[in-house]
Image (cartoon, rainbow, N blue to C red):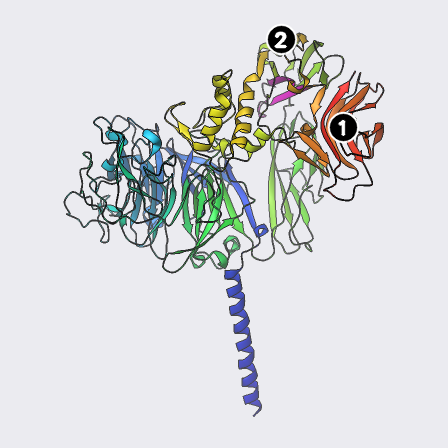
Amino acid sequence: MLTNWLSYFAGFFFFILCIHGCRDRDSARKTPPETNRFTLVELAKGLDEPMELGFLPDGDILVIERKGAIKRYSQADRAISIVDTLPVFHGLEDGLLGMALDPAFERNRWIYLFYSPDGDNPIQQVSRFTLDGNPLALSDEKKLLEINVQREECCHSAGSLKFGPDGMLFIAVGDNTNPHNQGYYNSIDERPGREYWDAQRTAANTNDLRGKVLRIKPEDDGTYRIPEGNLFPEGTPKTRPEIYAMGCRNPYRIAVDPKTGWLLWGDVGQNTIDDPSRGPISYDEWHLAKEPGFFGWPYFAGPNAPYSDFDYATGINGPFYEAEKPINNSPNNTGLQELPPAKPALIWYSYDESTEFDHLGTGGKSPIAGPVYHRDRYPAAGAAAGRKFPAYYDGKWFIAEWMRDWINVITLNDNGELIHIEPFLPDETFYHPIDLQFGPDGALYVLDYGTNWFAKNVDSRLVRIEYEAGNRKPITSAGADVTAGAAPLTVHFSSEGTFDHDKNDRLTYAWDFGPDIPASSDPNPVVTFEEARVYTVTLQVTDSEGAAASQTLRIQVGNSPPELTLDFEGNRSFYWDNRELDYRLQVTDKEDGSLHSGIDPASVKFYRLYGKADVFAESGAATSAGLELILNSDCRSCHALNEVSVGPSYYSIAQRYTGDSTTVDRLAKTVISGGSGVWGERVMSAHPQLTLEEATEMVNYILSISKVKIEELPLQGKHVFNLHPPEKTEQENYTFKAAYTDKGNAPATPLTTERSWTFRPTQIGAITCDGHSQCDLNAQTRTVRFNRDKAYILFRDIDLTGIQSLTLGADTAQAEGKVEIRMGKPDGELLGQAVVDSDRQITLPLGNRPVIGDIYVIYRNEKVKSAEDEVLYLKWIRFNR
């Protein structure tokens, strides 16, 4: 009897455990994880147009770059090095574009590359190489597939490579067609001599490999065979049996679900302006193909929205194409005329906010297909298991947006139908993510291309995003007061900013300064480095559960950085009309000497700028409505301040249109609608989400850059402040900049010091403050609204030499209270005060105090009860001699 009762309770207890276990697993799949459980680890920076990445069996990472370099990131050495460089043609959008490791790489060491061979023969090529150490065995190249292309006109090369779970190799090929046609609509220009503007000869041509995703089975002898299940059976007249998906424009990045075998890709769309008589507005797309098919281009876009059969010779619209029976009757078509029925995209979107799909954003467009995550493919135990993503993401598809700099996650049902889209780490900053792959450890690896097009960007990088399921690692912050100097060098290290998301964890610190220097467990140690060499200093922080994180610093001993000073008399913050500045630049370096002995004056750069010299420098101040709109838009994806990216520099735009009275309205409308042809054939994306007023603010700000005046100056002389206009509201800063790079002192490398000295006009806008508290800055009205007692704005490092009073330009229609001027901090020394009344200008006597410090303008009014109360609006501050 007792045995029966024990059996009953044991079974009941097991039943309860099962219920709770199932509930826990079900909850883990339904509940998004906290974003602070993800850590972004930067592995490498400064890559030169990275394209795709892949993983070696030992966990090392291969990265290819468009200009031909193949690089390897070593997990053990935490460093990236060049494996080899493939000679490629990298004009237009060509180059080394795709990479895939053979599924049996651990045995055969084979790697497949999609590249544009250097030379006069215009082809794209998929080749197999053997990677068994450095470098590649180039003599062992096996050419699987050649794709005939033209190199006379841009664009669309694609090039992504992916293996499916059955060993089939998918190859993405762009339509190799110039998109810069009339109206920037679908590329169907059939006029003689305009063949390269007709995508019907490529993407819609059943007998051409371009504008497709191909599917082949590589063979051991370096050839390939045609698998069953492609779009056209082998031997079908006027077709290529390699085709799996046709009707692609620029399928830039593809993925294959490793369980279902479904093909997924992002297709970069046209930059059309909305004209219903010709077809839909520009759509970019994400596709999912469970079977082969025709996916629309150049006849359909998005949800199979049709284009008209536009005649470029006559400018007349023909009938709209029919999705059920598309016909390719172009004279440039060498394939079948009747095409398979068109298949719509899974997701489509344009420049403005999508009404069909969530979380896609606005602005320019370039969709990137990332991987589908399957948790059971990754380690269940061991050190690497701690990085793998949680069960919540099991079966979900990761996508990215190259122009909009985000990563999203797509949930699909078992039939491949869209359930919903959600942001992934929306507060994280990405820099044009161009490839995403899950590594063998189950962490997500991201290649950031970087800000500017066709450039080696300092913000290009390889990062790992890892997940911490239980106890989280500490967030480590290591700093030093100096990182370079002569021997002996004393350095004060700091761990300030280090913290742990698990609040009850106790942290221990371990500083490693290299051989022969004692380690330290002090959070903020002080160390003297006696020998001249480069030291690698590592701070490792460990929590009470044993989880650790580290950060490395580089300390260079043996070479002191140069010192630059500008000697002059008088106020160091402001200029007055025709003020004369007798100056002398001093440059000294402990190893190089000075300008009088050892330093060549010609090696020192010294120049003066007047105007918005650092127009896109990050600042906490709301400098202007136009700048704020630019910084919050996608403008920087295509434009830089003084460098050509895919679009012209802001300086070039400002210089071209200075003095044209019709410019502002015309350019503002172009910003909204999009445009082309002025700066070559590149298209500027439309921005329909902007109002005309907002676009006007942006244009006005860009055009103001033309007022910047730059002049190189002698290292000693006299400068007269006379470039500014008489109207105080129009005056800008004068900035003097100096730079010197020393000669180094082996093993220490050369060091550069740059310094600047800025002189402001005596009347400055209130919203140009360096900090504020409990007040609102309005870039549109250029005012600061003080709506709390003790609210303030702050101006840093103000020289009051020769300043007798301050005048505040205010809107005080219903204001009360008083204004205080304090030095150093909000409750610091009181320099002056005045009662607020109906006067629009409030003057506060200061007396001549030759001091330099932070100036606080503080509003005092204990009667303020609500943030909605009418209080003080401040427009400007004038410093009076």
Q: Are marks 2 and 1 in contact (CB under 8 Å)?
A: no
Q: Nearer the viewer, mark 2 or mark 1?
A: 1
Up the image or down, 210 lies above or below 744; here it is below
Q: Indicate the amino acid at tag 2.
A: Pro
Residue 172 falls in which quadrant of the image?
top left
Left or right: residue 63 versus residue 739 is left
Badge 1: how crowded within 10 Å, few (<14), some, or many (20+)? some
Residue ranking furthest to the bottom: 1
**In the image, residue 407 lies at what x, y percent?**
48, 45
Up the image or down, 763 lies above or below 175; here it is above
**In the image, residue 842 lies at what x, y percent?**
79, 25
Q: Which residues are magenta?
A: 732-758
Residue 392 located within the stretch drawn in magenta:
no
Left or right: residue 295 versus residue 18 is left
Q: Tag on residue 714?
A: 2
- Taking the spot 34% from the left edge, 31% from the top edge, the residue there is 183
Residue 743 located within the stretch drawn in magenta:
yes
Left or right: residue 201 versus residue 279 is left
Badge 2: how crowded within 10 Å, few (<14), some, or many (20+)? some
Which residue is disc 1 drawn over?
Answer: 854
**In the image, residue 102 lies at what x, y percent?**
33, 47
Up the image or down, 370 lies above or below 92; here it is below
Up the image or down, 590 lies above or below 262; here it is above
- Taking the spot 58% from the left edge, 18% from the top edge, the residue there is 743
At mark 2, the secondary structure is loop
Residue 175 falls in which quadrant of the image?
top left
Q: Can I make out residue 551 in this image?
A: yes
Between 606 and 685, the residue placed more toward the observer is: 685
